Image (cartoon, rainbow, N blue to C red):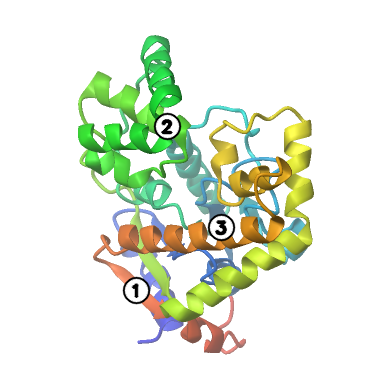
Amino acid sequence: MNLLDQIKTFLSAGDNHKMPTLIVVLGPTASGKTRLSLKLAHLFNGEIINADSRQIYRYMDIGTDKLPVQQQEGIRHHLYDIVNPNDEFTVADYKRLAIKTIEEIRQRGKVPILCGGTGLYISAVVENYQIPEVPPQPELREKYENYLKLNGADALHQLLSAKDPSMAEKIHPNNVRYVIRGLEVNEIVGSGIRERRGAPIFNVLMIGIDLDRELLYERINRRVDELVGRGLVNEVKTLLMKGYNEKLSSMSSLGYPEIIAYTKGEITLQDAAEEIKKNTRNYAKRQMTWFRRYHDVHWISGTEVDNMDFSPALQPQN
């Protein structure tokens, strides 16, 4: 059974499912998730929910490769541009908003399509993470911020890895705000959230895009060049001029630290672009490591997406 027939069967059996249905489109960066989700939304009367932890931020459009409104093809998109770069936003916040949005989409008679590459966000919804409610701990935060100043981001991440490997696996070392938050939570509750799965709340069809590594890297390299050409440098300068500190978690997103280094005269723009490409390739590897943990993903190749027949033979659902 091909993918489109499988989705049609999955949705047509919706009334027989004991839980609401949810389609998830996942894969590494630059794999074609956005294009696939748009096609599926057209065919199956869907709306798209962001599952990218960087596209939640306002004013960070180019570096996160956010799909412009004029290219959204009339499909409603949710959970994009919902917080400012200096706002506190947790996985618990994302899970709450995503579930609320999914329910609202279903109430409109539409199909919710969760699309993105942040494994932690996807797992929080799909595996119903029971995230401990831990308020900010100022004393602990100050303690780890001092540790960061003395030892650096890598040492801070290693500290989290020693205390809670499963939590450290989910957070990039440059994302110091989340690393510190992970250490706070660890000290309070004693363990990460990975093992705190709850009973499923959705019947999920997970669709993953798996590109040949050489092709994926080629796409990543091309995308980085396009982002620089579209004005990534000016976007970073504008964020800094607005007063958003380079130490913010949001500003640790791929592309931003490298361009900040360029604006300081520490590296050339060409070197910054090459560094972004390398870091993005490494990130894609980590994404696939995360996604391979899922046992029920319908994997399709990138070329299969390119060649997929989205003709009107399969009419949109009403």
- Dot 1: element: strand
Mark before the other along the chain sequence, 2 or 3: 2
Callout in the foreground (3, 1): 3
Distance from Cα at disc 2 to Cα at disc 3: 19 Å
The spot of residue 35 in percent (x, y) is 60, 71
Q: Does residue 132 lie above or below 270 as drawn? A: above
The spot of residue 40 in percent (x, y) is 55, 72
Residue, x 31% and y 41% (percent of image)? 168
Residue 113 visible somewhere in the drawing: no
Q: How crowded is mark 1: few (under 14 residues within 10 Å), some or many (20 or more)?
A: few
Q: Does residue 192 lie above or below 37 as drawn? A: above
Q: How crowded is mark 2: few (under 14 residues within 10 Å), some or many (20 or more)?
A: some
Q: In this view, does 274 lie to the left or right of 6?
A: right
Tell me the amino acid under the disc marked 3: Glu
Distance from Cα at disc 1 to Cα at disc 2: 40 Å
Q: Identify the residue position indicated by label 1 in the image.
A: 298
- Dot 3: element: helix
Q: Identify the residue position indicated by label 3 in the image.
A: 275
